[in-house]
Image: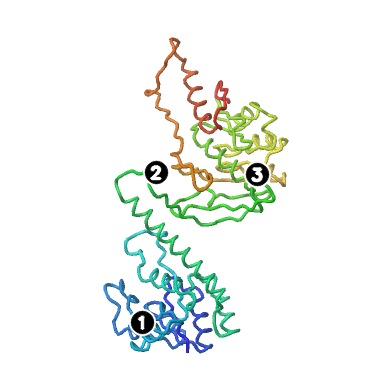
Amino acid sequence: MPTALLSVFDKTGIVELATALSEAGWDLVSSGGTAKALHEAGLVVTDVADLTGYPAMLGHRVVTLHPTVHAGILADLDDASHVADLQTHNIAPIALVVVNLYPFSDNPSIELIDIGGPTLVRGAAKNHAHVAVVVRPSDYARVIAEIQSTGAVSVDTRRDLATIAFTEIAHYDIAIARWMAAQVSVDESLPEHLLIGTQRVQELRYGENPHQSGARYRFDDATSWWDTAVQHGGKELSYLNLYDTEAAWRLVNQFASASCVIVKHANPCGVAVSTQGSIAQAYSLANACDPVSAFGGIVAVNRAVTREMAEALAPVFTEVVVAPSFDADALEVLLAKKNLRVISASAPSARHLDVRSIDGGLLVQNADAVNLDRSTWKVVTKTQPTAAQWDDLAFAWQVCAVVSSNAIVFAKDQQA
């Protein structure tokens, strides 16, 4: 009978998988919490300790790290010498390894650096010619279907599962390496090896153009305002909507006073700070900067949207409006525009790196941080700026930092 080794942190679906294997005549080997769950489900399970002759030790740091386990996984059954070694040492080959890893990214710590799990996964994935490795509960169904249909997992599926497994291991190791690097006191913002672990969190209808596919990914160790943002109405956000909204929302959150930013094609075409603390005034001033370009743009404000602002915005074709919140009567006005995407969001986190792709690699730089400490500014003209001009210079510099290179920002009275 074929043997399956099951050792999972996430128990989702494991009893159903083990039951299907048992009904198909497979021997089950397990340990710890997984073995307990299977025993409680009434399944016959061999504990790893009984297989190896060694109990779990060092607080379960060492459980499956044993030749009996790994020889059974790594043996090339087409190699007569490997088969002879198994027979000499009375080791049964293992045809299926089901493992998922400690959730390190959820709560990074030394104790959540899994050793035995990744070792099992790497061994099984390496020997996918003879062993199937499953690291995601979402893949259990197809494994069950193949075993119930043919008694085994096909070579194509084994290869596919091995690819998934190596990807999961790489993803896991990157998270650990980034966490370890963060513990080091030396600041290395542009390290020799830039390790980036990401997770696809949103599939888009298409990319910049309909013939391009698109998706949003999140860095593993990052939080994103996008994940908690609430879309109250309107169509699904597109690739360009996301890109332009990010630019508008990041800029407007740099201002302390009631402000509005209107972005078109990733560049601000209208920015204004209200002199009266009125978000409606801020919108009207920003829109007046370039009403032609504002048509079809992204509107971001850093105060709750009032009915007054909503009524001013409603006649203007706008793709997205994003704000910390919306008054109930303002939402009523905006949601009447069925295609307008209405989003409430929290402030964005600080950005550390700017990354762009080039042929064969990436261009990486530290994010542009505007220095607003006026004590470090040097006036190189005989004429000193007035207090109002100082304010406009600081305002213009914040806007200029997000405008594409070689652009000019005209600013006066907190409008740009």
| Residue at left offset 53%, top offset 84% | 20
Pick the front one: 18 or 366: 366
Is 54 placed above or below 267 here? below
Q: Pick whichever of labels 3 and 2 is earlier in the sequence.
A: 2
User: Mark 3 and 1 residues: CB-CB less than 8 Å, in contact?
Assistant: no
Is the residue marked by circle 2 packed among few (<14), some (14-19), or many (20+) residues within 10 Å? few
Q: Secondary structure beneath disc 1?
A: helix
Q: Secondary structure beneath disc 2?
A: loop
As shown in the figure, which amino acid type bears the numbered disc 3?
A: Leu
C-alpha span from label 3 to label 1: 60 Å
Residue 210 % position (x, y): 69, 50
In the drawing, what numbered circle is on residue 48?
1
User: Mark 1 and 2 residues: CB-CB less than 8 Å, in contact?
Assistant: no
Q: Secondary structure beneath disc 3?
A: helix
Q: Quadrant of residue 333?
A: top right
| Residue at left offset 29%, top offset 81% | 55
C-alpha span from label 1 to label 2: 44 Å
**Which numbered mark, 3 or 2, is in the foreground of this view?**
2
Q: Mark 3 points at which residue?
A: 331
Is 247 placed above or below 107 here? above
Q: Name the residue under label 2.
A: 190
Residue 382 % position (x, y): 43, 10
The residue lying furthest to the front in this view is 80
Residue 148 % position (x, y): 58, 84
In the drawing, what numbered circle is on residue 245?
none
Q: Pick whichever of labels 1 and 2 is earlier in the sequence.
A: 1
As shown in the figure, which amino acid type bears the numbered disc 2?
A: Leu
* Horizontal side, residue 212 vs residue 195: left or right: right
Pick the front one: 317 or 56: 56
